[in-house]
Amino acid sequence: MEDYSIKIDNVTKIYNLYNKPTDRLREALSITKKSFHKKYYALDSVSFTIKKGETVGIIGENGAGKSTLLKVITGILSPNEGTVDIRGRISALLELGAGFNGEYTGLENIYLNGTMMGYTRQEVDARLKDILDFADIGDFINQPVKTYSSGMFVRLAFAVAINIDPEILIVDEALSVGDVFFQAKCYKKIEEFKSSGKTILLVSHSLSSINKYCDRVILMNKGKKLDEGEPSQMIDKFKKVLVNQLESEIVLDEVGLDASAPVRGKWKENMVVNPNIDSYGNSFAEIFDFCILDGKGEIGNKIEKGTPFTVKMAVRFNVEIKEPIFAFTILDLKGTEITGTNTMYEKTYIPDTKKGDIREIAFTQRMNLQGGEYLLSLGCTGFKDGEFTVYHRLYQACNITVISDKDTVGFYDMESTIEVK
């Protein structure tokens, strides 16, 4: 007999979408059975098997069907077609506070969830101290959960889910809530859970977490299972999905821009760009295109820590400029400048430009920042009549997601080596 925890066979989930509420009534009353809806396939013929003891991640864009899939697995939703076979007791942390009654206290909700899982009061009693210690919300445990902050909600929900000794743990994005210390405690608990041979199904937008903890990854796209395989391979494929490069990859020539592109300005079309870029300067020059290239030469916003990457920009000059300076800066999400450089710092001389000239600039370096989200700014500046002048700057032009399976303290990794005698 096949040794698995979860088996999904040809599962399809369809919703009927109506343009307006009255269409539902018109359809119900229609003598000719006329249809007033269109079908939306939240899941379309999805099949996969998760072996016992595996940690499997599910990734995909918003609307890919990830959460719907988990609700089908946990029995919250019933599929229109296909079968779901679960072998083992499931503990699921799907949505913030799902399964909690807002009017009940935290303590009452612990017993409520335990009962829903099939435990007796005595069995919940035996686990109560571990749950309370893990949640660490103090006297709030005796207050109605409707008064809880989102952080307290998830602390209690995760504490219940992880401490009732399930055979299968399913987590959907819940670990993105709470402070960094609680998240660290959750992931430590997941590692313990994994080492004990339990099965884990993890949905997260944190590709670093997916890469670090998962044995295998399932990539979802528009309700379908696009592929499954090694985490790094699926993350690479997901990066292409994000910028619509899955079927048609853009390859850059040694000069810089796509050699086959009929017009310039195509790089950023393959990036996830900030829709509210702060663009300013005196318009003597224009940064009309930019992109980030990973170590494989592929355009995208995601870079693996420890690998080389390139920031490229294309600049058109509207007037004659002497010795322009090109720059990029990486910022945290609060706007604090973390690192960056420019052609002046790098002692790269840029010759004078004439009106209509175009320059393509590439900064290549190794990504040593910690895993997480960052922002990229680009600039073309210089000195006009001895005064520092901004010709054009794109502030927070796009995000950079650093994927890492090993982080240290602070913003960057010093790549320390350790010797023990």
Image (tube, rainbow, N blue to C red):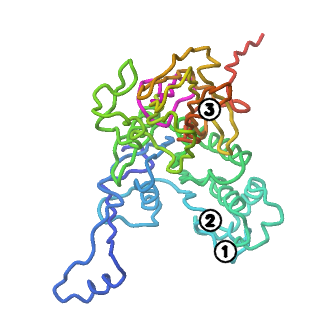
Q: Which residue is mark 3?
A: 329
Q: Amino acid at mark 2?
A: Gly
For the point 56% across and 26% down, the residue is: 326
Q: Amino acid at mark 3?
A: Thr
In the displayed structure image, the side of residue 155 where residue 59 appears, left or right: left
Q: Which contiguous range is marked in magenta?
A: 294-315
Residue 271 on image: x %, y %: 44, 40
CB of mark 1 within 8 Å of CB of mark 3?
Answer: no
The label nearer to you, 1 versus 3, is 3
Q: Which residue is mark 1?
A: 102
Closer-to-camera residue (132/222): 222
Closer-to-camera residue (59/385): 385
Determine crowd level at label 3: few under 14, some 14-19, many 20+ residues with C-alpha closer than 10 A: some
Examine the structure image and report whether residue 307 is included in the region drawn in magenta.
yes
Q: Amino acid at mark 1?
A: Gly
Residue 108 on image: x %, y %: 71, 72
Query: Real-space Cα distance between discs 3 and 2?
Result: 39 Å
Disc sitting over residue 97 in the figure: 2
Query: Up-down: is 271 above or below 97?
Result: above
Q: Quadrant of the C terminus?
A: top right
Query: Real-space Cα distance between discs 1 and 2?
Result: 9 Å
